[in-house]
Image (spheres, rainbow, N blue to C red):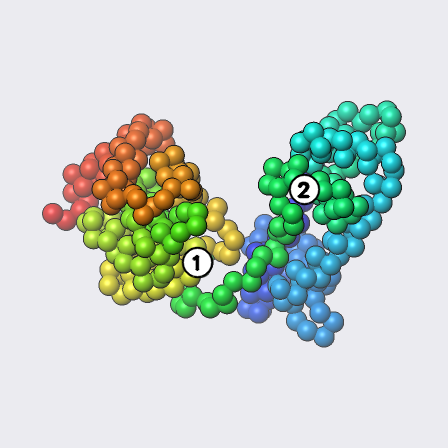
Amino acid sequence: MPKISKITYCEREKIELYLKMGKSHRWIGKRLCRSHTDISREVKRNSGIYSPYRAADAQKIHEARQRKKNKKKLEKFEYKKVKEFVVENLKNDLSPEQIAGRLKERRPLFLGGLTVSHESIYQYIYNGEGRFEYLYPHLRTKRHKRQRRFDRKKRNKIKIKDIISIHLRPEEINSKSRIGDWETDSMIFSKQKNTLSVQYERKAMLCRLRKLKSKEAEETENAIAGSIKSLPNELWKSITRDNGLENAKHLNTLNIFNVQSYFCDTYSSWQKGGVENLNKLIRQYLPRKTDMSKISDEEIRAIQERLNNRPRKSLNYLTPNEVIAEYIESGAVNP
């Protein structure tokens, strides 16, 4: 039987929203593809005594419980041989996942078959005696402090107004049954304000790239407007965005071009996976350390055309430009 994943912070936000809407635990469970008992348990365990369920409070309660549990995990390192085995392999630059996996598969007799999870090893490195042994430089990231999954730096709490959730997006967008539905993202580069505004058409896989001086909302929206103007109006029906503040002026696009925007859930970039995958292709030409001040608009356009003339397997090895040309020639676009 597959292991049930833990409820994420994103799911907790949805549970809070649905409870405020008066939805039942069973209804919420179906919506989140979870058992209603999972929802009931979550609400019961992670609610305040005298207050309604709140995602932020639930996350804090959950993390406090995990810290207590992880403290018990560290007791395994009281076994000297286990500690020596882990430390020796860490110093040989093996990752906690590799060490834990080898212990689980091989179960060395000299350790009495004892296993340790990779999470326990991370806890030892950052919270146990290991923090005095200077072990973190042997990790791939070499972080001296662990980046907690949900305890990210609190960003500017300004909220984007009048957003429409991706969950309200029409099915014809989700199914990629038409041309004209786009995803957008902003690519950042090391130690500079210059960014790259990227738009990606979900069905034809066409892209538009524009260099920006900053990630400000005004700059971003002007770039998207430029991309819209570069193509016939019929090729722009919707845009899917993330919750970055560069998208705060999304209503400009709606009011001027009548192009509706839909917003992904928080920390759910996979919901616009097309543009995220495109970003990886762009990195072949513009690595993160690229000095964008030295890259001209002509060079950006050359990269754009190279990507748009790239045969794609999902398009039966047609290029995005060829797909768009066929669509226009079919009469779907007004001359």
Give the image location of residue 52, x and y in percent.
66, 71
Residue that numbered label 2 is attached to = 136
Give the image location of residue 19, x and y in percent.
60, 66
Residue that numbered label 1 is attached to = 244
What residue sits 43% from the left and 55% below the top? 242
Q: Which residue type does callout 1 highlight?
A: Gly
What residue sits 19% from the left and 45% below the top? 332
Mark 2 or mark 1, earlier in chain: 2
Q: Secondary structure at mark 1?
A: loop
Give the image location of residue 48, x and y in percent.
71, 69
- The quarter of the displayed image where residue 99 is located: top right
Q: Find out whether the residues at labels 2 and 1 contact each other: C-beta distance under 8 Å.
A: no
Quick check: 43 above or below 201?
below
- Outermost left residue: 335
Q: Secondary structure at mark 2?
A: helix
Check disc 1: other Cα within 10 Å, few if <14, some if 14-19, many if 20+.
some
